[in-house]
Amino acid sequence: MNPAISPSPQQQQLQQLHDIHLPAQIGQWPPAIGWWFLALLVIITISASLYFGLKRYRHHAPRRQALNELQTLRTNYVVNDSQTTLKALSELLKRVALSYYPRNRVAKLSDQAWLEFLDQTSDKVDFQSGPSNALVKFRYQASTSQIQPDVIDEIFNTCKQWIKSQK
């Protein structure tokens, strides 16, 4: 080509063209509104789970403590001292009942009324007709030598079932 020849108008326009410029990348922040709702839903779910879990944990604290104390009574049980054990079991059941039921309903109960209450508050146990009526029967006797160790074990099991059944 001859340098003296001037470029045509089309060539001049082509030389003025620039490369194609791509738009800037879309940023990650701020996220779309759906992500905000999802984050809020996750926070609410975790908060509700913690709240109700803590509430349930606190509600069952008397039951856990009573089961621990029942286990301690069972390990410390001495065959010759059944009366003290029966008294401690009855007191433990009364404390658990006072934790879950109104004071005016539980505090005044004794003897047969107490056993009826225990039967009414649990479908799984029978205090009146089973060997667990020894909680009341031998309460005021000086000697409880006629209570066999296997009967005491059954009373422990009945008490444990009653404590576990309390909601």
Image: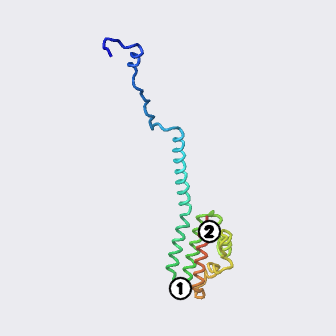
Residue 112: quadrant of the picture = bottom right
Dividing the picture into quadrants, the one containing residue 90 is bottom right
Mark number, residue 164: none
What residue is drawn where x is 54% and y is 47%? 44
Give the label on residue 165, or none: 2
Query: Which secondary structure lies at badge 2?
Result: helix
Residue 66 pos. (x, y %): 54, 70
Please name the amino acid that badge 2 sits on.
Answer: Ser
User: Residue 19, percent across and down?
Assistant: 40, 25
Q: How would you rate the neighbour count of disc 1 (Cα within 10 Å): few for under 14, some for 14-19, many for 20 or more?
A: some
Q: Position of residue 39 (x, y in %)?
A: 51, 44
Front-most of residues 24 and 74: 24
Position of residue 5 in the picture relative to residue 134 (left or right): left
> Given the current orientation, which residue lies at the most extreme bottom position?
146
Residue closer to the observer: 69 or 145 = 69
Q: CA distance from mark 2 to mark 1?
A: 28 Å
Residue 97 placement (x, y as % from top left):
60, 67
| Front residue (pair 156, 3) | 3
Q: Is residue 86 left or right of residue 129?
A: left
Q: What's under tag 1, amino acid-wise?
A: Val
Q: Earlier in the sequence, mark 2 or mark 1?
A: 1
Residue hosting label 1: 79
